[in-house]
Amino acid sequence: MRIELEKRPQASVLYAVLSPFIALVLTVIAGGIMFWLLGKDPVSALYSFFVEPLLDVWSLHEIAIKAAPLILIGVGLSICYRSNNWNIGAEGQFIMGAIAGSIVPVVFHEWHSPLVLPLMLIFGMVGGALYAAIPAFLKANLNTNEILSSLMLVYVAQFFLDWIVRGPWRSPEGYNFPVTRNFTPEAILPEILDSGRTNLGFVFAIVAALLIWFMMRYTLKGFEITVLGQSERAGRFAGFSSRRMIWFSMLLSGALAGLAGISEVSGNINKLQPIISPGYGFTAIIVAFLGRLNPLGIIAAGLFLALTYVGGEAVQLTLTVSDKVTRVFQGLLLFFVLSCDTLILYKIRLVFPGRTAAVGQGAVQGAVQGGAE
Amino acid sequence: MGIIEAILLTVVTAATPLVLAAIGELVTERAGVLNLGVEGMMIMGAVLAFAATQATGSPYVGILAGIGGGALFSLLFGFLTLTLVANQVATGLALTILGLGISGQIGEAYVGMSGTKLPPIAIPGLSEIPYLGPLLFKQDLIFYISIALVIGVNWFLFRSRAGLKIRAIGDNHASAHALGIGVIRTRYLAVLFGGACAGLAGAQLSLVYTPQWVENMSAGRGWIALALVVFASWRPWRVLAGGYLFGAVSISQLHAQALGLGIPSQFLSALPYIATVVVLVLISHNRRMTLINTPASLGKPFVPDR
């Protein structure tokens, strides 16, 4: 048996909509097999992974809290990936944004003012953008591969965070734990609903996604991103600069990752500690692709991947499987998303060696007959 | 054994996994396929090698398991990017994310267990040479394989017919296809080779470098190996040189920490990653040279027309 691809005359709209859902179904099936291999009842495991978190107000809030950074980072990355700039260091930009945003509440902790929070958010965005400016500069001016440079900087950021919370910023009241002092109330993102912990970060995520959706759909900038991503040459003829696009997309995604970082620290953790992210920057890559690089799709995808985090925690408690299942799920999901996307541009045909010969003969006969007529 | 020898010995141990993973990726990229999943294949090799060694008691079975695991895992990448022409960058990332997840899941049972170290094999006569002997001829099997692979790949790519075909495919897959070379089939083999090498590199980590299982123990080495291929401008001998250079950087960083120079340990730990970026910049800032060296079809999808 062989698999052959046949290019469709134009991209299939049907599969463009369907492919993420096919991928979801395949992931759930594969996940069921995985639970079965781990010796758990697949149906009840999948139920407590994917359904139970949706039935409880507390866990719905947890999903919103975890979806916020995923959506913020994911929409930023979608701009990068659409314009062919492979920023995979969002995790580092998230961390640097969190650190820069924490300058105000940690260093100037005695300053009380309603300006604290806005300043933190701005610092967070600037911090993330500046950190993304490194791979952007290296790519635009020194021709350095941004995939590798942005990823290497993630490790550097993690070590930097580790140093700063154990060294200069360690809280004097923290009983020698590697944490900064707790943020004062005016440095904490307010909660938006009475029923639970969801904070303003979720609103930022939705607003950012809508703004980027508007930009992609109705502005020249959006068109520029699409053109440069599909063909740099065509973009040049239209007067678009791919070098400026490197800067634009990297700074934008860095700023959004930085905003996600400071929102997470301010709204959810309330201090800095050695680890502030369960891999949001990497999971957001999956979110971007599952959302088909479309900001509205990314909102849905972000919520779904947040569910895998919460579901993973749930099965960890109820079924005593490790939290690693979440990462397996996320990896599987990206695989299935990428393979299902093939359906949009290609028809997939299974070719069986025995039958190909027959088909080939038929075609030849047809051609001969056609010629004879 | 003097202190210098001891340090050089650790450099060799640190360099071997980088050389192995990079030499595999070099062949893959020479065939025009960019597999960013080296980190994922490496960590799968590491966990499977450790698990197989625990199960059988023989680290040599572990080596085979590592190679097989890396190769099988790379097949997944091959199927997506070669058969289904999925985006190579994204698929490579998926491979890494999945590999880190699955290895963590498999490795759960082995956390904290002490492993079996791969024994060194002394080559009679040669290992008696002062200084060089213990360094180069009293090593474990994986080290010898890494050196043999560099020599072999260099010969294969530049002196054999099959190697010429691989380079032709990497530089222009459409022309190679027109000449009747099986582009997809050859690329599958190149991807498999890359996976096997990454798996072996992983096996080295869990059987030689630190004979135990630690989650995420590859710690970005797969990514450094990818940078190494760029650094080596796709030439096997330079992979060897670059691998040892990076090995030396990461070891000197450890020794500097032990000396306690007053520099925070985190800054020293970050050094290999910063060095990678610096080296990448130095090697690729010349646009023309980069263009000449890079396989022209690298990362581009290919669908054979029929």
Image (tube, grey):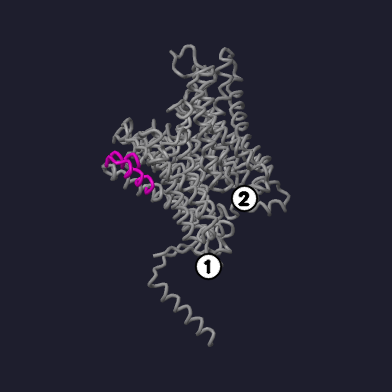
B167 or A369: which is nearer to us?
A: B167
Say what secondary structure mark 2 lies in. Answer: helix
The answer to whether residue A72 shows anywhere in this view is: no
Position of B204 with respect to A372 (left or right) is left
Mark 2 crowdedness (10 Å alpha carbons): few <14, some 14-19, many ≥20? few
Magenta-drawn stretch, dominant element (helix, strand or loop):
helix
The vertical placement of A346 against B208, above or below, is below
- Residue B174's spot in the image, x, y percent? 57, 63
Q: Label 2 is found on which chain of the structure?
A: B
Could you say which disc has been placed on residue A273 in the image?
none
Q: Is residue A66 magenta?
A: no
Could you tell me which chain the residue with mark 1 belongs to? B
* Front position among marks 1 and 2: 2
The residue carrying mark 1 is: B180
Asked if residue B159 lies left or right of residue B204, the reply is right
Q: Is residue A81 above or below residue B79?
A: above
**Image location of residue A238, percent across then percent down:** 72, 52
Horizontal and vertical percent position of residue B36: 50, 45
Q: Which residues are magenta?
A: B48-68
Taking the spot 52% from the left edge, 67% from the top edge, the residue there is B180
CA neighbours of label 1 inside 10 A, class few (<14), some (14 to 19), many (20+)? few
Q: Which residue is tagged 2?
A: B293
